[in-house]
Amino acid sequence: MPIKAIVFDAYGTLYDTNSIGPAIAADFPGHAELVTALWRSKQLEYSWLRTMMHRWEDFGIVTRESLRYALETVGLSTEPAILDRLVEAQNRLTPYPEAAQALDTLSGYRLAILSNGSQPMLDALVAQSGLGRYLHAVISVDPARAFKPDPRAYALVEQHLGVAPAETLFVTGNGFDTAGAGSFGFHVARVERITTDAIRQAVTEQPPGATAMFRALRMRLEAIGFAPEAVVTTLTELPAVAASI
Amino acid sequence: MPIKAIVFDAYGTLYDTNSIGPAIAADFPGHAELVTALWRSKQLEYSWLRTMMHRWEDFGIVTRESLRYALETVGLSTEPAILDRLVEAQNRLTPYPEAAQALDTLSGYRLAILSNGSQPMLDALVAQSGLGRYLHAVISVDPARAFKPDPRAYALVEQHLGVAPAETLFVTGNGFDTAGAGSFGFHVARVERITTDAIRQAVTEQPPGATAMFRALRMRLEAIGFAPEAVVTTLTELPAVAASI
């Protein structure tokens, strides 16, 4: 069955989560790399733990709790004004440089975002970045009250777009999301932003830094099966991938 | 209601997960610290992801998959004989030095382990370490087909011991398990093996290194609520905690 819809993860796929760095550095000079790695690691952990514990709260809450954890771990201030400012800065992440052009060339498909982000976070992110013009839907997991990779989150795509999983290509840069989307039944293209060799070289430095550990743990394909049908290095390769399925 | 049962997490609570180091070093000299940190981090991640994805496999499988991930990340051999040997070495982890004595002093309570480990893994671990004589039950999450912190895992305690959560003290060194057990309804004592100050000092080294990053991410209390009723630094403090509830 040919592909009718292409659905994108947001954080780490269309948007560069490392672009939060300058906002952290403005409040905490010299700590941006470490706080970014701890924050993003814990943000995903908390989304998983809350889903498993049946204690779902939206990604705004999860983002704030994980930021508090990261700052406390490093011994930095967690005063409310700082938490407010940095959580809000997540709504101004930078798209990867080729994102707009790639979406433009895919206009023959129904295009959407499916993200763990809350609807207000995603609406702000899409509006400020100008990617909204290319998207038919910006889907938050909010109504499912479960985060990816819970199948209830992925099921929202068909409910919104009316396109079956077998006719949907899911695009993500996140390993857990690659496995989760494949397990659910989507066709999956993985965006590999950094090679296995580069990750290995950085993490085998003695001792490895925070970014190297983050990349080693979160920017590789997972070893739990559900391999993607395609691996691309930039979003501009997607038209060829979608046409080949 | 007084405490009738005291239930222990295994990995990181009664048993020191870092004691796998020499087995890794035997196959991969110079890589024990990094592989240990990546393996344990990913082992828990995979238990969570598989539970959320409704793709449960037992902890033996999860342990092997996460080891393969860790070794591939570092660029080390994943030949089956090595995977077999290191997975089996998990059944020979060392108990914390005070574990046997602490369990002995708690003999007035019904004592058990509730662990993500598979039943064969736990039976081997308890047998080799000699802790079996103190325990009324060694409970694997296997029958629930869900890993902690899913409530289905914690519900196995009452099924096995016939003791209600309100009469049970759950003891764990893991942050996610502290939150999960508290959310479920147990009384919870956290074992803090390393202080917040020590974690902060190590992780703010430039660069922090693998163990410091692991500790920063997995050996602190989580910031998602469900605070424990007690924090102890060794298991020998538990009689006073149990009597005070």
Image (cartoon, coloured by chain):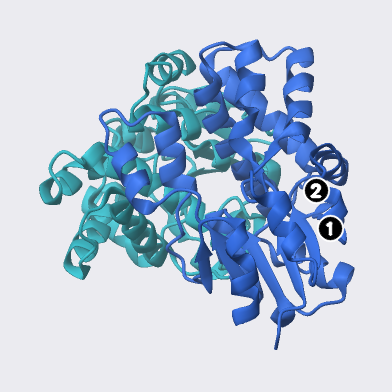
Chain colours: A cyan, B blue
Q: Residue A236: image x %, image y %?
A: 39, 26
Identify the secondary structure beneath mark 2.
helix
Nearer to us in this view, A209 or A132? A209
Q: Residue B148: image x %, image y %?
A: 68, 57
Q: Label 2 near label 1: C-beta < 8 Å?
A: yes
Q: Residue at 78% across / 34% down in the picture?
A: B91
Identify the secondary structure beneath mark 1.
loop
Nearer to us in this view, B112 or B44? B112
Is B243 displayed left or right of A32 in the figure?
A: right
User: How many numbered circles are shown?
Assistant: 2
Residue linked to disc 1: B135
Q: Is residue A220 visible?
A: yes
Q: Residue at 47% across / 28% down in the picture?
A: A216
Is A173 displayed left or right of A40 in the figure?
A: right
Q: Residue at 64% across / 35% down in the picture?
A: A2
Q: Amino acid at mark 1?
A: Leu
- Label 2: few (<14), some (14–19) or many (≥20) C-alpha neighbours in 10 Å: some
Nearer to us in this view, B241 or A35? B241
Dividing the picture into quarters, in which one does residue A169 lie?
A: top right
Q: Quadrant of the N terminus of chain B?
A: bottom right
Residue linked to disc 2: B131
Indicate whether B42 appears above or below B134.
Answer: above
Q: Amino acid at mark 2?
A: Leu
- Label 1: few (<14), some (14–19) or many (≥20) C-alpha neighbours in 10 Å: some
The disc placed on residue A24 is: none
